[in-house]
Structure formats: structure tokens, C-alpha cells
Image (cartoon, grey):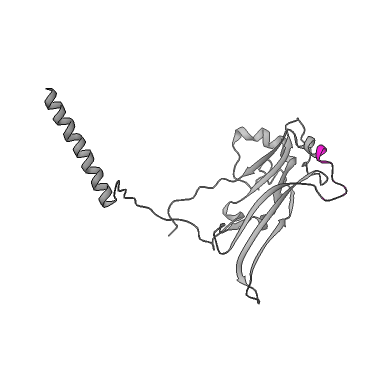
Amino acid sequence: MGALCSVLLFLIVAAYFGQKIDILVTREDVNIVTASLDSFFDQDYVLDFDAGLNFAIAFTAYDGTDDSPLNDPSIVEVVFNAYQWGGEATDGGEYFAGRSNIPTHTCTREELGLDGNNSKFFPIVEESHPELDFHSKKFICVDQEDMFISGDYSSAKARLMNFQLVKCHGHDYCKSDEEIKAYLRNKFLLMVSNQIRFESRKDK
């Protein structure tokens, strides 16, 4: 019985050793065959307000107050930016590239979908209505004509958007760093945005 086990063990080791020699010689191990479908938007596709793109930002403290936006230029401001490059070349052969601030306004209750029938956002889930209603005066919106993006960081041309919480600096009216740090404690950024799911197939 012991001799049989030894022979069996020898055969297993030999088979394993032979498999590894074959891998070493052919440089092949595991072959994985996959099928993929590339379905994406190219740099010319513009995702805009009419297609559902929209978001609003509120900078607030959970302190029980429902006051207007906490945008104090002497401390911090919520700023929306557009980054854009590419497009048509200028007379000098150079392509446009630059950053610009996007104008903002305090969102109305109608824009947030709390009043009326002209909401700028998809329907808000019922559980979020009380919080959105309470903080509604603090939300900052972008005009719909400025709400659009295209391309990405690797595109030859693109327009991207972001928002920043910008600390006051370089001005006589700026508060001290200690005052700004104290002001920022226990503050939060709230966002309302449309969530869009795309089909995995391009439209025919």
C-alpha cells in the first residue's frame, strides 16, 4: 500500500512539474477570453441642463438655523468654476484653454422642487424633503444656460465644472486664520443633484 501511494505521489509531482515546464517554455499560463462593447460619449457630446445635468450646493452648520447661504467673503465663499480647452484654433494657431467663474444665485423653492410645478431637479425622495425644506434658503444654483459639460481630462477639447470652498486671502477685509478655522468647525457641504443612469447601448 505504501509503495502504491509513493508511485501515485510521484506521478502527481511529475505531472505538476511537466505543466510548469510547459508554461516556462511557451510562456503561457491562464488564457482569458473576454468580449467587450465600447459604448461611450465622445468629446463632441454635450451633457447639459436639458439632458438632466444639474446640481446645487449648500454650505451650512447643523445648528438649527435656516438662514441664507453662509457665503462670507471675509471668510469663505462657495465658487463654481468652468474649465474649458480645445475647440477652434485662433488666428495664431493656438487653442483656447482657461478657467472662469460661473455666476450663481440663491436657489428658489420652485427650482428645488419644493413649491410649484417647475422644478429644476428630478423628484426628491420623500425622506429627504424635510431636510431640503429646512436648508432650502442656503442652496446655491447655477443658471441653466451655464450648466453643461463635455469631454474629459484626456479629450482634445472639453468643458468641465467643479465647485470649491475658497478661503479668503490677500485682502485687508479677510479674517485671521484662527477666526476662519473656528468658523469652519462643524460646517458641512450639502448637495442636491440629478442622478442619471445611461444605457449600455448607444442610441440607434
Q: Residue 106 colored magenta?
A: no
Q: Magenta stretch mostly in which secondary structure?
A: loop
Instruction: Give whichever of 176, 63 is nearer the camera.
Output: 176
**Residue 70: percent from left, percent from top:** 78, 41
Q: Quarter of the image holding residue 123?
A: top right
**Residue 49: percent from left, percent from top:** 61, 54
Position of 204 compared to 60: left or right? left
**Residue ID at (72%, 40%):** 59
**Residue ID at (64%, 54%):** 161
Question: Can you say whether 117 is above or below 129 in the image?
Answer: below
Instruction: Give whichever of 74, 57 is nearer the camera.
Output: 74
Q: Quarter of the image holding residue 8?
A: top left
Question: Can you say whether 54 is above or below 59 in the image?
Answer: below
Q: In this picture, which residue range is highlighted in magenta?
A: 170-179
Q: Quadrant of the C terminus?
A: bottom left
**Residue 110: percent from left, percent from top:** 69, 45
**Residue ID at (68%, 62%):** 98
Furthest residue to the top? 1
Question: Can you say whether 162 is above or below 9 in the image?
Answer: below
